[in-house]
Image (tube, rainbow, N blue to C red):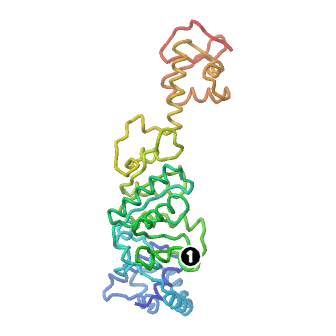
């Protein structure tokens, strides 16, 4: 198989990954089958596989890159890197199952390719994870080792790095998914080379081999971390960023995702992910039920507690102005903010307002007693 053509197909500009894979599927299904070499060299087949005029022009122009790409491919192979087109048996079947035609057209790697065919678990989470989340990560990674499962890591600081190191130090196996080109990971290869020699580590990249790290690549890489895994555990998520978007995408695709149930007053988005359909697990990764009152975020819990306090105050005092409510609750809010809170859901279902002598008063909904009216 001529890897130069696969390399060229992978990095053609102006055609999406999904479309590239669809094009090659048509080549594969064509009778007679169209090889990757023919796709580039024989323009007479382009119409038969449905290339648009714009795509035909792109393929024609890409021929100019073949000579240079041939040199790059030879250089990569001579340095011990693997080039794995989506059609090869070595390509991850799990990745193709999870991402379909959105799978990377080619994987670049170094290490034990057999790890791509073994059961794998992704342990993901925040770069700035709390100690409890890092401890959870370590426990799940060690559990994977006892179950002979590969740990998939994005090699970011925090949860990713903890998952990788915990698995390897416990004698397990791991796959690193890079947010950069495979040849720019020199320091990482030096640090983890013994694990590659032992056959316990595979480093994978989907990007141009000499591309440096970038935030864009880090975000684009996240679906591949999830895609390589049979199971996904979330140690800690914010309400935005790569972990959050990856879990939301996974839930949309009906994947089972395990999220660590947070302790009371933890400031993260774990409960929000559980609310959206993720499976709550304890600190050992065992699925556990979550009571309705535990399904509240810390913000929602604080809000509910404030509503309860206000209800109690109004039950005792009758009707109060917003400023009087502020004084009795001792919260550092403006009059405008407390009014907005009282008029929002679920307050407005429990508390009503009315005018009395040009004053706006708040009372428990359904009560009519106007005694003990307090003015500020």
Question: Which residue is outermost to the top?
Answer: 371
Residue 368 % position (x, y): 51, 10
Above or below residue 238? Residue 1 is below
Instruction: Give how far across and how far down residue 137 sits, in percent.
Output: 45, 56
**Up-down: is 369 above or below 284?**
above
Pick the residue in front: 320 or 81.
81
**Observer-nearest of 47 and 228:** 228
Relative vertical location of residue 215 with respect to residue 2 in this rendering, above or below? above
Residue sitting farthest toward the front:
170
**Within the image, what quadrant is residue 119 found in?**
bottom left
Specify the quadrant that holds the C terminus: top right
Question: Left or right: where does residue 271 sit relative to residue 310?
Answer: left
Q: Residue at x 53, y 37 (%)?
A: 299
- Callout 1: 10 Å neighbours few (<14), some, many (20+)? some
For this rendering, which residue is in front, 188 or 296? 188
Q: Which residue is at 46% across, 37% downward?
A: 296
Q: Which residue is mark 1?
A: 185
Residue 196 rendering spot, x and y as whole percentages? 45, 77
Quick one: SS at disc 1? loop
Quadrant including the N terminus: bottom left
Front position in the image: 345 or 326: 326
Q: Is residue 209 above or below residue 283?
A: below
Number of marks present in the image shown: 1
The residue drawn where x is 63% and y is 24% is 330
The residue that appears at 41% across and 49% down in the rendered structure is: 283
């Amino acid at each position: 198989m001529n890897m130069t053509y696969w390399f060229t197909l992978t990095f053609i500009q102006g055609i999406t990954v999904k479309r590239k894979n669809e094009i090659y599927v048509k080549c594969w299904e064509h009778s007679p089958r169209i090889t990757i070499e023919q796709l580039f060299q024989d323009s007479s087949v382009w119409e038969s596989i449905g290339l648009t005029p714009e795509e035909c022009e792109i393929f024609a122009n890409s021929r100019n890159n073949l000579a240079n790409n041939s040199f790059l491919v030879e250089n990569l192979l001579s340095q011990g890197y693997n080039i794995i087109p989506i059609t090869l048996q070595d390509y991850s079947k799990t990745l193709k199952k999870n991402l379909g035609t959105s799978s990377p057209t080619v994987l670049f790697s170094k290490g034990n390719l057999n790890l791509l065919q073994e059961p794998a678990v992704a342990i993901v989470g925040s770069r700035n994870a709390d100690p409890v989340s890092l401890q959870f990560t370590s426990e799940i990674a060690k559990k994977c080792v006892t179950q002979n499962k590969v740990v998939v890591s994005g090699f970011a600081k925090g949860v990713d790095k903890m998952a990788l190191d915990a698995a390897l130090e416990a004698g397990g196996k791991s796959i690193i998914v890079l947010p950069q080109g495979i040849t720019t990971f020199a320091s990482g290869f030096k640090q983890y080379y013994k694990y590659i020699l032992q056959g316990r580590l595979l480093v994978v990249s989907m990007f141009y081999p000499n591309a440096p790290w970038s935030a864009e690549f880090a975000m684009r890489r996240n679906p591949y971390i999830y895609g390589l895994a049979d199971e996904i555990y979330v140690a800690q998520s914010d309400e935005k960023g790569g972990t959050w978007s990856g879990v939301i995408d996974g839930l949309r695709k009906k994947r089972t995702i395990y999220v660590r149930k947070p302790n009371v007053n933890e400031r993260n988005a774990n409960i929000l992910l559980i609310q959206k359909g993720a499976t709550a697990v304890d600190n050992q990764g065992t699925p556990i039920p979550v009571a309705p009152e535990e399904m509240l975020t810390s913000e929602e819990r604080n809000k509910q507690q404030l509503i309860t306090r206000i209800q109690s105050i109004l039950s005792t005092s009758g009707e109060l102005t917003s400023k009087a409510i502020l004084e009795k609750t001792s919260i550092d809010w403006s009059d405008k903010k407390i009014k907005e809170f009282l008029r929002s859901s679920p307050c407005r279902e429990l508390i009503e307002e009315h005018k009395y002598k040009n004053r706006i008063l708040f009372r428990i909904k359904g009560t009519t007693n106007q005694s003990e009216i307090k003015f500020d």
